[in-house]
Image: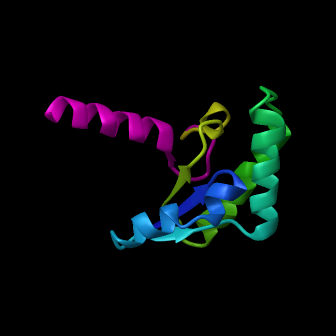
Amino acid sequence: KRLAVLGTQWLVDSDVYPNALGARGVACVRPTEEEKQRVHAIIMNELVPGIFKPSSTEQICQIIARMRAEGCNAVILGCTELPLVLSDENSPLPTLDSTRLLARAAIERAIEE
């Protein structure tokens, strides 16, 4: 019913997830401006170059925990790098890995045709 979305600032600022989820009656919850900037910096300055700091993963988990307290049921990992450090095992919310979900959907569609 309520999904948190994390990713780069460009993605989180876009209407991609709010429009797609809203059309299905699901609320899209975005991080605060400060949280959005922090996640963006971690993605671009650490994860993209292959730097994995436990302290940064913990910061993202704290953001997810705050969003869980706001009533989110799961978190969309809307960036290919986030699943490098986040999963159902360490996230305060169940994770939806957008890359894997899109790949599965593409395979299912290809099989149907």
Residue 109 visible in the current orientation:
yes
Residue furthest toward the left? 113
Left or right of residue 9: residue 14 = left
Q: Which residues are magenta?
A: 89-113
| Number of marks in picture | 0
* Quadrant in the picture for the N terminus: bottom left
Q: Nearer the viewer, residue 63 or 45?
A: 45
Residue 98 lies within the magenta run: yes
In the rendered image, the vertical position of residue 6 relative to residue 108, given as above or below: below
Where's residue 10, x and y in %? 67, 57
Where's residue 58, x and y in %? 77, 45
* Quadrant in the picture for the C terminus: top left
Dominant SS in magenta = helix
In the rendered image, the vertical position of residue 58 relative to residue 48, given as above or below: below
Residue drawn at point x = 32 percent, y = 39 percent: 105
Left or right of residue 112: residue 90 = right
Residue furthest toward the front? 113
The colour scheme of the drawn protein is: rainbow
Q: In the figure, residue 62 lies in which quadrant?
A: bottom right
Left or right of residue 39: residue 85 = left
Left or right of residue 63: residue 68 = left
Residue drawn at point x = 69 percent, y = 51 percent: 8
Residue 1 visible in the current orientation:
no
In the rendered image, the vertical position of residue 4 relative to residue 110, given as above or below: below
In the rendered image, the vertical position of residue 76 relative to residue 100, given as above or below: below
Q: Nearer the viewer, residue 50 or 70?
A: 50
Where's residue 112, x and y in %? 15, 35
Residue furthest toward the top? 50
Residue drawn at point x = 65 percent, y = 51 percent: 7
